[in-house]
Image (cartoon, rainbow, N blue to C red):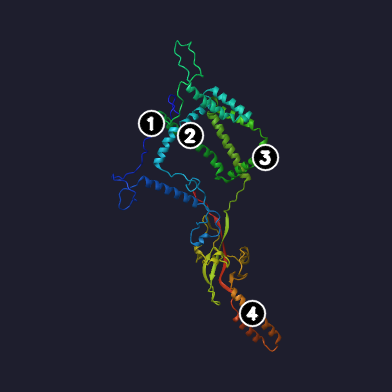
Amino acid sequence: MGSDGAESLVNRDTPIPVVQIHPADGSTPTAATPSTEHSASHRISASKLKDKLESLGEKSGRDTSSRHVDKMFNLSSVDGNDGSSSSTAKIKDRRSRTYVARPNFSIPTMSSNFRRFNSRIGVAFILQNRLIRLFTWTQRTQTLSFLLVWTFVCVDPYLLPVLPLACCLFFVMVPSFLTRHPEPEIHVGDADLWQGSLSGPPLAGARTIKPAPEFSKDFFRNMRDLQNCMEDFSRLHDAVLAFLTPLTNFSNENLSSMLYILILLLANALFVTAHLLPWRLIFLVIGYTLTALGHPTVQDLLATPENEKFLSDAEHESRSLLLILSKSDVELESSPETREVEIFELQHRALHDEHGEYESFMFSSSPYSPLSPARISGDRPRGTPFFEDVLPPRGWRWSDKKWTLDLLSREWVEDRCVTGVEVEVEGERWVTDLHYEALESEGERKKQHERLKKSSKGSKDIGEQEKEILRGLWEKSRPSRKGEWRRRRWVRGVERMPMKNGE
């Protein structure tokens, strides 16, 4: 809103200035990339500055989101990375352009928008000044009138929808009508002149609200009020954070945990008993109390050193009481969070080499079972060939000195519903693929073996040495049941690492 005389608040039709940073030698700015060896001065244009700011913003957003890792206990670092993979959960940046489509930062746009905003914000500062005068009891009749209206609203909340309509009538419509029908000016000697009639024709033009022109008094008043408003917001913001942050950011976990429990209990109690509370009386007392605190006499009493010291001591005692209560009732786990990670040692043997030895292939996060999707699609297993290359998940560190062989091989096979394998319950605990073609031909060999046993038992003339020779010949002709892959499971403990500030 404008000043007392002119009710105009800018719209400037001049072109928007374009910002360019010229080189030191006065040449035309270019978009070339600065060279550290052949150029003595850096050249940058407004478009390059814009792109640089965008890249910095996107890079900062990526770095922030990549620092947060969800549960990662499948050892994705086995694939050759440090734990950061595509499966890592990312936290949404609700100010990113990927979350909502908004224009990019631009210096000319910023300058233009600030000028337009500053020329139109005067009405908000007028409202702010009126509220300050109202609650500081500058005119006691206005403050008492507000308390009466507040009393009516608290006693009968159904009157609340009347307030915006009444404000529109008395603060918008009536002043606009009086502007169109002004009272005549009274001079000395014109005492008998009648003061005018509101039913006559309009005598003045309608009031219009215009943006304040640039470089006008109203424009600079708006800049002054905006400057002071930013300072007030900064102080209020810092004061609120200084009061609430130590209580709610779990820097003292006992204190924040106790406060969390108290808020939770209060919320549950209000959920049940909120309809029993006298909310009209509560809001009436709150309104009268806040309004009374703005009275100059009360402010003078609160500003005395004794009262300031009393309030500070009361706040300190309340925090101390809450801290003592939290230390006595809240017990926190002091040991770090631990988990167990797993890795599978894979060995391979050519399928046609029935009597060959298995050779170490790699350590993988997957057992590469016969019916796994990777196996069915023909993909090779992924991992690392050495134990030393296996890294803990990001944000964790090893709590055990070395890997331990999982002796309960049957359990992890059953948990994963792995089929088509042979499980060793003793020895090295290998879980080996079965060769189904060999199994089919083995059925006939078993029948021959049974016939051999029966003939050996029925013939008394065959000695024990001859029986062993017959059995050895059958075992030598028996095809191998084992497939080309075998694996076993290794486990190792990890614990959470303390995070640095900002991660």
Residue nearest the observer in this picture, 418 or 406: 418
Q: Residue at x 58, y 39 (%)?
A: 319
Q: Secondary structure at mark 4?
A: helix
What whole-number distance in Å separates the C-alpha atoms at marks 4 and 1? 105 Å
Residue behind mark 4: 444
> Is residue 486 positioned above or below 190 on the image?
below
Q: Secondary structure at mark 1?
A: loop
Disc number placed over residue 272 in the picture, else none: 3
Disc number placed over residue 215 in the picture, else none: 1
| The furthest residue to the bottom | 461
What whole-number distance in Å separates the C-alpha atoms at marks 1 and 2? 25 Å
| Mark 3 residue type | Val
Task: State which tag comes first along the sequence, 1 or 3.
Answer: 1
Q: Does the CB distance between marks 1 and 3 fall below 8 Å?
A: no
Q: Where is residue 219 shown, x and y percent of the image? A: 41, 31
Label tally: 4
Residue nearest the observer in this picture, 39 or 248: 39
Q: Residues within 10 Å of mark 1 (few under 14, many from 20)?
A: few
Task: Point out the frontmost of discs 2 and 3.
Answer: 3
Task: State which tag comes first along the sequence, 1 or 2.
Answer: 1
Disc number placed over residue 202 in the picture, else none: none
Q: Residue at x 62, y 77 (%)?
A: 442
